[in-house]
Amino acid sequence: MGALITAAILRAGRPAAGEPYRAAIPAPGERIESTQIDGNRILLRLSGPDGEELVVVDAATGRVIGRIAVNAKP
């Protein structure tokens, strides 16, 4: 019984399989230079007026996991 309840709780926060989702990644003034997929992670390389930035996104949810500024102006 406990396993059923745990499984229900874990599934409640995720969209059903096959359901599309939308994700907005704030990147004002930046453009996508490249993308790379590795497992359930998407790596976006962005460039803009302040330099380049790497953004890691969870492919299953669209959630931004991390951002790394590269060659940023001081």
Image (cartoon, rainbow, N blue to C red):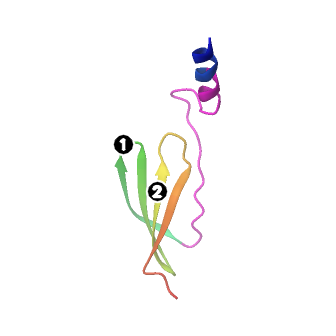
Secondary structure under badge 1?
Answer: loop
Q: Single out the residue that lies furthest toward the front.
A: 2
User: Would you call the spot at circle 1 few (<14 residues within 10 Å), some (14-19), or many (20 or more)?
Assistant: few
First of labels 1, 2 by sequence position: 1
Residue placed under numbered mark 2 in the picture: 56
Which residue lies at the image location 58% right of the left edge and 39% below the top edge? Answer: 21
20 and 64: which is toward the camera: 64
Residue 19, quarter of the rendered image: top right
Which residue lies at the image location 50% right of the left edge and 86% below the top edge? Answer: 73
Q: Are marks 1 and 2 in contact (CB under 8 Å)?
A: no
- Label ID, residue 39: 1
Residue type (three-letter) at the residue carrying disc 2: Val
Spot occupied by residue 60 in the image (x, y as percentages of width and height): 50, 39
| Magenta-colored span | 8-29
Spot occupied by residue 50 in the image (x, y as percentages of width and height): 51, 81
Residue type (three-letter) at the residue carrying disc 1: Gly
Secondary structure under badge 2?
Answer: strand
Q: In which quarter of the image is the N terminus?
A: top right
Q: Is residue 36 left or right of residue 28?
A: left
Q: Single out the residue that lies furthest toward the top.
A: 1
Which residue lies at the image location 36% right of the left edge and 42% below the top edge? Answer: 39
Q: In this view, does 42 lie above or below 52?
A: above
| Prevailing secondary structure class for the magenta stretch in the rendered image | loop
Q: Does the magenta stretch include residue 11?
A: yes
Residue 12, quarter of the rendered image: top right
Q: Is residue 23 magenta?
A: yes
Spot occupied by residue 62 in the image (x, y as percentages of width and height): 54, 46
